[in-house]
Amino acid sequence: MDTGTLRDFLEIPYDRLEEMNLEVKSQRLARISEERAQEERVRYLTDEKRIKAVTVCFTDLEGRLHMLDYDKKFLLKSADNLTFDGSSIRGFSAQQESDLRLVIDWPAFYWLPADVFGPGKVLVFAEVRDRDGSPYPADFRTRLKHFCQDLHAKHGYTCQVANEIEGFLFKGRDAERRYAETGRFEYVSTGGYYHSLPGDELRRFIDTAAEVQRAMGFGNEKDHPEVAPSQFEMNYSYSDALIGSDQIQLYKLLCRQVAQKFDMSASFLPKPVTGVNGNGMHTNMSVAKDGKNLFYDKNGEEGVSKMAWDFIDRILNNAPDICLILNSSVNSYRRLDPHFEAPNQIKASAINRGAMVRIPLGNERSARIEVRSIAPDANPYLAIYTLFRTGVEGPKSEESDEQKRSRTRFLPDNIYDGIRLFKQSSYAAELLSEAVHKKYAELKIASAERCPAALGTQIKVAEVMFHHEVTNQYLWNQF
């Protein structure tokens, strides 16, 4: 007997998925109240009998996405009392204070393609709360959300972001975890920039992942193979900073899931292979008010406003202090190599792709700044919170423009210098809070000490094996 005919789980066509997810996205952009969103979603979950489970997501201090599947009926009864063991999450609570709470962020709700994520499931993001219900200090999704809400309430500002996230596609499942055994990654394509035949493995992966991305309401723009062999990039539209950060996590999740279906691995290590370009996450940023782009000034230098230049100045002035946040792994410092268009110069430029900040050619709608030094393994919420808060209210340089432009400073070229600058920075401590600042530094030191002190020219097994997005408890304990 074919038991498959007995199942009746939710499966939605891709065109309808896109409509549903874009509708929820438009509600978020319109700042729908959380109460109204909760009422609509709870009613939907109650009425839709074909949903079996709700995937609830949160992100730890280092940027790993964690997912718990709750039975739908249980979730509807217990949504106000969801707890988890925070001591099992590196960088969260200590063992003696382990229990933490999850509060569902009902506006951040997604329907999932059933052929990729399984039928009968939906996904929603959550905020991490302390035992007493207060926001958990190490949950930077909540920190970013509240910062953007406060900025909008005080000044009417809307923080906008779009990320260009590069990745590699390698042969075999779990290629990163197996690197400790194999010591190598295998390309699926060596075609190069923009070049891929319609039916080859890289193009099939990109096409499939782009379909999933489109169905989840990203607002696709373009996708293509990148400069390095087996490298890809799929671009999507500008959005609110919190939505954009959520989409970073979903982008990496859906790429990994699609790759696995092809018996391959999607990797977002900043520099997984020696001798070719690494993976970046160029972050396009602007601030708007009442629909007007405040970064645009047709008469301004490079076509951007004084506000945009002040924003840039604050980021550049504090670049050494925040480098560890934007480049958070041993491997990420390999990417800051000037031989591969590395954005390691603490300067801004319209044309120099080695500059940390680029000012792309733009108009009234598209004028923005592009922070190029951020790696795809950074905690997106922490990184984007840091960039916006620094750009809006961070300390400015006391040097004149002429002094600043007459010399070139460079970002750290290894994690030890990044950690040292971060630890001694009073600004970084203020940004994260002293307790979280200390905890973050300790996590980075723990990873660094598992790796050779000198990077050398070749990728070391340890920098992959103990990478915060690759490792699991088993690998972490093999030290």
Image: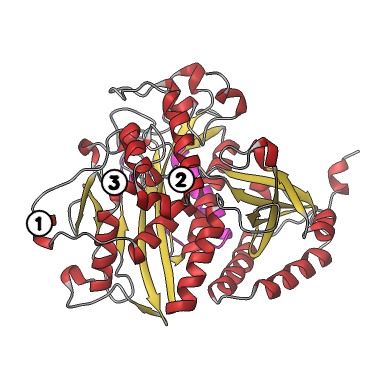
Q: Which of the numbered marks, if any, corresponds to residue 403?
A: 1
Kindly report which numbered mark, 3 or 2, lies closer to the viewer in this rendering.
2
Q: Is residue 220 visible?
A: yes
272 w.r.t. 4: above or below: above
For badge 3, the amino acid type reads Pro
Q: CA distance from mark 1 to mark 2?
A: 31 Å
Indicate the secondary structure of the residue bearing disc 1: helix
The residue carrying pointer 1 sits among few (fewer than 14), some (14 to 19) or many (20 or more) residues within 10 Å by Cα, namely few
Residue lying furthest bottom: 290
Q: In the displayed image of the protein, which residue is found farthest to the right?
A: 1
- How many numbered discs? 3
Which circle marks residue 320 in the picture? 3
Horizontally, residue 73 falls left or right of residue 201, namely right
| Labels 3 and 1: the sequence-earlier one | 3
Q: Start and end of the magenta stretch? A: 192-221
Amino acid beneath label 2: His
Picture coordinates of residue 227, whole percent (x, y): 30, 41
Marks 3/1: CA–CA distance:
18 Å
* Horizontal arrangement in the rendering, residue 360 relative to residue 390 (left or right): left
Instruction: Give the residue at x 25% y 36%.
Output: 337
Q: How is the image coloured?
A: secondary structure
**Residue that carries the numbered disc 2 in the rendered image:** 437
Relative vertical location of residue 107 with respect to residue 91 in this rendering, above or below: below
Identity, as a three-letter code, of the amino acid under mark 1: Gln
